Image (cartoon, rainbow, N blue to C red):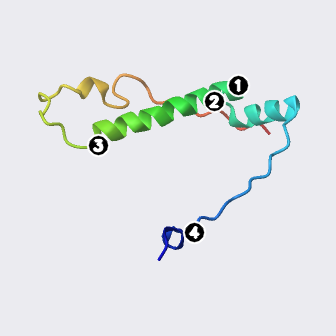
Amino acid sequence: MSKAAEAPKVDVVHWENEPPLEASQVAEIEDQIGAGLIEEIIQVAEGENALVDTMLESKSWEELSEKPPEGQWDYFSRDQHTPGTQEPPKAKS
């Protein structure tokens, strides 16, 4: 068999370009998301994506190689020093 016959078949996907959004459409999307300007949202998402890679590399979900002293993390327990978490933003009607 020739090398060409052994190569796996690859399907080519052709993407159609999306039409550009108007400024009013972008503003409406930003209002619906409620997290600031779209550029800021993209920056936060990129930072979270980089954090995922860091967490994957450090395997932060695994047990620690050295156990922390008893009570070391008590101060950081949820709802110990604050009345509660922030209310999520209300959806605009």
Disc 4 marks which residue?
A: 9
Image quarter for residue 93? top right
C-alpha separation, residue under disc 4 versus residue under disc 3 = 39 Å
Q: Residue furthest bottom?
A: 1
Q: Is residue 86 visible to us here?
A: no
Count neighbours of disc 2 (C-alpha within 10 A) and say few if under 14, some if 14 to 19, many if 20 or more: some
Q: Position of residue 18 (x, y in %)?
A: 81, 45
Q: Position of residue 69 (x, y in %)?
A: 11, 27
Disc 1 marks which residue?
A: 37
Q: Residue furthest front?
A: 2
Residue at position x 27%, y 23% from top? 75
Q: Position of residue 43 (x, y in %)?
A: 59, 27
Amino acid residing under circle 3? Trp
Mark 3 and mark 2 lie on one chain; the one further toward the N terminus is 2
- Seen in the picture, residue 93 relative to 2 is either above or below; the reply is above
C-alpha separation, residue under disc 3 versus residue under disc 1 = 32 Å
Q: Is residue 85 visible to us here?
A: yes
Residue at disc 2, secondary structure: helix
Amino acid residing under circle 2? Ile
Residue at disc 4, secondary structure: loop
C-alpha separation, residue under disc 1 versus residue under disc 4 = 42 Å
Residue at disc 1, secondary structure: loop
C-alpha separation, residue under disc 2 versus residue under disc 1 = 6 Å
